[in-house]
Amino acid sequence: MSGIGIERRFEPRKTNNGDERRLAVDGEEEEEDDDGGNGKGLEAWERAYADERSWESLQEDESGLLRPIDSKTLHHAQYRRRLRSLYSSSTTSRIQKGLIRYLYIVIDLSRAAADMDFRPSRMVVVAKHAEVFIREFFDQNPLSHIGLVTIKDGVAQCLTDLGGSPEYHVKALMGKLECSGDSSLQNALDLVHGYLNQIPSYGHREVLILYSALSTCDPGDVMETIQKCKKSKIRCSVVGLSAEIYICKHLCEETGGSYTVALDESHFKELLLEHAPPPPAIAEFAVANLIKMGFPQRAAEGVVSICVCHKEAKVGGGYTCPRCKARVCELPTECGICGLTLVSSPHLARSYHHLFPITPFDEVPSSLLNNPQHRLPRFCFGCRQSLLHPGNKSSFRAACPKCNQHFCIDCDIYIHESLHNCPGCESLRHSKTPRFESHGTIFAALEVLNMQDLKRGVVSHMGCWALACTVFDSVLKFKILTD
Amino acid sequence: MASIPSKLYSDDVSLLMLLLDTNPFLWTGANTTTTSLPFPGFLTHVLSFLNSILLLNQLNQVVVIATGVNSCDYIYDSSSSLQKTADSSENGRMPILCSRLLSKLEEFVIEDERLSKDDSPEGIVSSLLSGSLSLALCYIQRVFRSGPLHPQPRILCLQGSPDGPEQYVAIMNAIFSAQRSMVPIDSCVIGAQHSAFLQQASYITGGVYLKPQLPDGLFQYLSTVFATDLLSRNFLRLPKPVGVDFRASCFCHKKTIDMGYICSVCLSIFCKHHKKCSTCGSVFGQALGDTSSTDRKRKTPET
């Protein structure tokens, strides 16, 4: 973003003489931008225009004036669009989410990764955002695993094995940042295919390729490898850094992944982070299964024992595997001795919000805002910020469809992206009562669907109504759709 | 807290979000421990505590949220009342805090009671902790947005009512969100039994969990343990985190288990191997192992 202000004035002068005068006025307003923008150390004349894409940060308003894009409203509009599309896809077609994922991140460290169109280079940008992604991924998918693979000199190399510790991956990635040679899609896919074939069938097998090159240099027929991946139900997604390539598109289409190409750094980050929430699960891809897991207790204070993970003697702390009594340092992990998956109940709880997403808020139409007859709440229900901006006419507000409380933009984003609770619904016992009462209807519906087992399930869940009910809502929709 | 960048605001300026449990079932019920500390007595402890927080540093800020049985609401915000105190400056600051908080609290309790008249209150004894936690987190996000100059926020739950199992998911969501934004949740349990939710909340977010032995001395507990700002906590020996039991209980028998089976679709917990998940209805293949054969079978049992 920085430093764009100066070019905003230069760039259109070359192309669009008519707007010159008006732009100069615009430019005055951006003096402060310019001052802050030189932080990168490059003066405007030192930069190459083609690289900075300064024209993309301008847009034309209704009267034909060129204006800098209002990034905040744009960001919010984007967010709402994403939310809507996410929500609609999860309620209409697919309910299941792949919560237990085995993801290999393939990072292309070929010659093309040294290109400077991303600053300072593609490789550095990729590594920086991969780190963010890995942390975000484990935050959202505590029961999942990541492995890292790099492509260099036409050869794919496994950087880290599948594991659940973000620190380990980040450390390994940062230590190996150099690029050379060609890129080979086939070698990478072959390698990953070999690893992912061994994982249990309930896991969702995924590959995320961060591809810088415009070509692939393969030892054999890459199409065969793609078919092999398809057969093994590996979902391959690619985020490109240069241009769209047919083979990548073909790969993603065949295996059910997504193919996106980044325009710039912020876009790249956005595209990458889209892969962090669990993807909707395709029924045939992963088998429903019961997984044996251990819930270890914290070891008593002051007990000295050797941990399996670092093979060091430690005093206190750590957890004891309930099956083989080995000591592990942190959860979630797999016991190094007996291979039992060790988790704690909060890890399971962390995934629940994917199963029970909160409804997107409705935008309150501006007609209602200016209507004096409706007395709308003056404050955001969440943070008590005033929703009436005397100078600012476009005071956006969103309303929860369930509890009808009004929220400001920032709370709306925070609630949907991080909190996953509607404060309005949570602080009203009323809004919950319909759910309790709807049990009768659920039972009736189940009768119709002839799902006696499920009904028995409801009874056995007496202790946790809210949970059972939400599951039921989804199950019902799911069943109705599949029948 | 090491990764929080140094602020121009000195490190010991704090924003205290106090979640006050106003559950009438707790304060009037046959609860044995609270009889030694009735609600008015409890309030005097809390008000003195709030005053002492505000006196510790002139930039300190206190926000009080009432956690009722049917609703939650903000009842006091020291930052918004600052300008108003300037207008009516003939009174001291303290009476204004008290009178404003008490009058809002009264309004809130009346409103909360009105809401409860509609449906039968039988069995509802838990208060809406998930709601007030969510409100507090929204407020804290607003403080974070306000710029690099902001006080260090923390949440203190003064909770007495038992946990409401239906709030489990919501409370866990709030806890994880607090953890992400590095907001510690302190909890001071004044009820008869320990609160498993708050134990987890404090443990996960790095806050202090305390259940005072003698409720009569509440002010002393509050001022010695919960008044300390986040920076000073590094130098103090605060109550150690209690051993939180992170074992899960199975959905089928409600037993706490060491080892169990998890449905890969909906993450329900079972103590034995089942053929079918009772929550989401998925049909299971073999538990672990035998991976290849189950792949093909999947479609037939589902439809």
Image: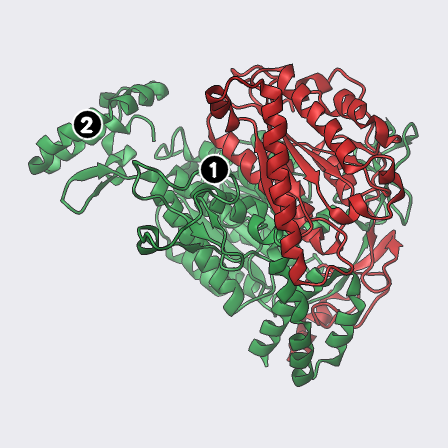
Q: Which residue is drawn at 53% across and 35% down?
A: B141
- Camera-nearest residue between A17 and B119: B119
Chain letter for the part of the structure drawn in red: B
Residue A147 shows in this picture:
no
Q: Nearer the viewer, mark 1 or mark 2?
A: 2
* Quarter the C terminus of chain A occupies: bottom right
**Residue pushed farthest front?**
B90
**The hue in which chain A appears in the rendered picture of the protein:** green
Task: Look at the numbered disc 2 and give the secondary structure of its residue.
Answer: helix
* Quarter the N terminus of chain A occupies: top left
Q: Where is residue A361 in the image (x, y as percent from the top left)?
A: 47, 55
Q: Tell me whether the residue at label 1 lies in contact with that at label 2, contact meaning CB atoms closer than 8 angstroms.
A: no
- The disc, 1 or 2, on the residue closer to the chain's N-terminal end is 2
- Camera-nearest residue between A35 and A357: A357
Under mark 2, the amino acid is: Gly
In this rendering, would A185 be left or right of A369? right
| A121 over B261 or under it: above or below | above
- Camera-nearest residue between A93 and B222: B222
In the rendered image, which residue does mark 2 sit on? A27
Under mark 1, the amino acid is: Val
Q: Which residue is drawn at 86% across and 42% down?
A: B192
Q: How far apart are marks 1 and 2 (CA)?
A: 33 Å
Residue B100 shows in this picture:
yes
Label count reads 2
Q: Position of residue B263 (x, y in %)?
A: 74, 62
Q: Based on the displayed image, in which of its 4 quarters is residue B205 positioned?
A: top right
User: Mark 2 packing: few (<14 Cα in 10 Å), some, or many (20+)?
Assistant: many
In the rendered image, which residue does mark 1 sit on? A126
Q: Mark 2 lies on which chain?
A: A
